[in-house]
Image (cartoon, grey):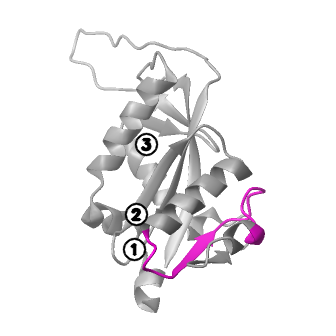
């Protein structure tokens, strides 16, 4: 059983409080640049297995790429994939892949998707902050989207199976497994 979600990461900064030694002053850049990249991710909370891709858009074409790659990566498994009802998540897309069975979440229920906890973890531990639908840099200014992608790759690589399990294995999942 995998849970899937995607998050937008961009170059719009979010200035927030930080610790500074007495007598010092924080120097924090601020920019509003509307450039974004997206992380598509699927996790298995029980095992900590995960798969992620950084893609340029949140649309049907990128979802196809994600599904194709995860289907190949886990080709020996039958995957039940819980996902929200975003416009680019459709049953037709998943029908292309014999080893992926979609399970659509109720509308407006992000709290039942453990991948949302991964975005929170990256926000708190990886130098990003999150607003309703955007993940922004926290007191860090990125000069290019490539810089953001490198920071995301660094953060995603740090999350081993035990870390994924610790932040995604909700009690209701544990009880059902």
Residue 16 shows in the view = no
User: Residue 107 colored magenta?
Assistant: no
Rendered location of residue 10, percent (x, y): 56, 30
Real-space Cα distance between discs 1 and 2? 13 Å
Q: Secondary structure at mark 1?
A: loop
Residue under label 1, please give it: 169
Magenta highlight range: 74-92
Q: Looking at the image, is mark 1 or mark 2 earlier in the sequence?
A: 2
Please say if the residues under marks 1 and 2 sit with CB atoms less than 8 Å apart: no
Please state the horizontal and vertical placement of residue 56, each as a whole percent of the image: 60, 37
Q: Nearer the viewer, mark 3 or mark 2?
A: 2
Q: Is residue 68 above or below residue 29?
A: below
| 18 over 82 or under it: above or below | above
Residue 148 appears in the picture as rendered? yes
Instruction: Please tell me which of labels 3 and 1 falls first in the chain.
Output: 3
Q: Is residue 67 above or below residue 19?
A: below
Return the x and y of residue 149 as percentages of the image width and height. Answer: 44, 33
Q: Residue at x 40, y 14 (%)?
A: 28
Q: In 3D space, how far apart are the residues under numbered discs 3 and 2 (Cα atoms)? A: 18 Å
Where disc 2 sits, the SS reads strand
What's the CA distance linking mark 3 and mark 1?
A: 19 Å
The residue singled out by tag 3 in the image is: 123
Main secondary structure of the magenta stretch: loop
Residue 128 x, y percent position in the rendering: 44, 35
Q: Dot 2 corresponds to which residue?
A: 50
The crowd level at tag 1 (other Cα within 10 Å; few <14, some 14-19, many 20+) is some
């Amino acid at each position: 059983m995998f849970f899937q979600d995607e998050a937008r990461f961009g170059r719009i900064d979010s200035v927030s409080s930080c610790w500074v030694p007495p007598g010092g002053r924080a120097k924090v850049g601020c920019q509003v640049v509307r450039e974004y990249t997206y992380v598509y991710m699927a996790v298995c909370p029980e095992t900590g297995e995960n798969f992620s891709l950084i893609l340029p858009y949140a649309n049907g074409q990128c979802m196809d790429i994600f599904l194709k790659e995860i289907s190949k990566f886990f080709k020996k498994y039958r995957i039940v994939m819980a996902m929200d009802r975003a416009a680019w998540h459709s049953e037709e897309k998943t029908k292309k892949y014999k080893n992926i069975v979609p399970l659509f979440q109720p509308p407006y229920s992000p709290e039942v998707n453990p991948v949302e906890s991964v975005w929170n973890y990256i926000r708190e531990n990886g130098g990003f902050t999150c607003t309703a639908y955007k993940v922004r840099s926290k007191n860090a200014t990125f000069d290019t989207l490539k810089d953001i992608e490198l920071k995301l790759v660094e953060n995603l690589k740090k999350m081993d199976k035990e870390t994924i399990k610790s932040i995604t294995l909700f009690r209701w999942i544990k009880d059902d497994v």
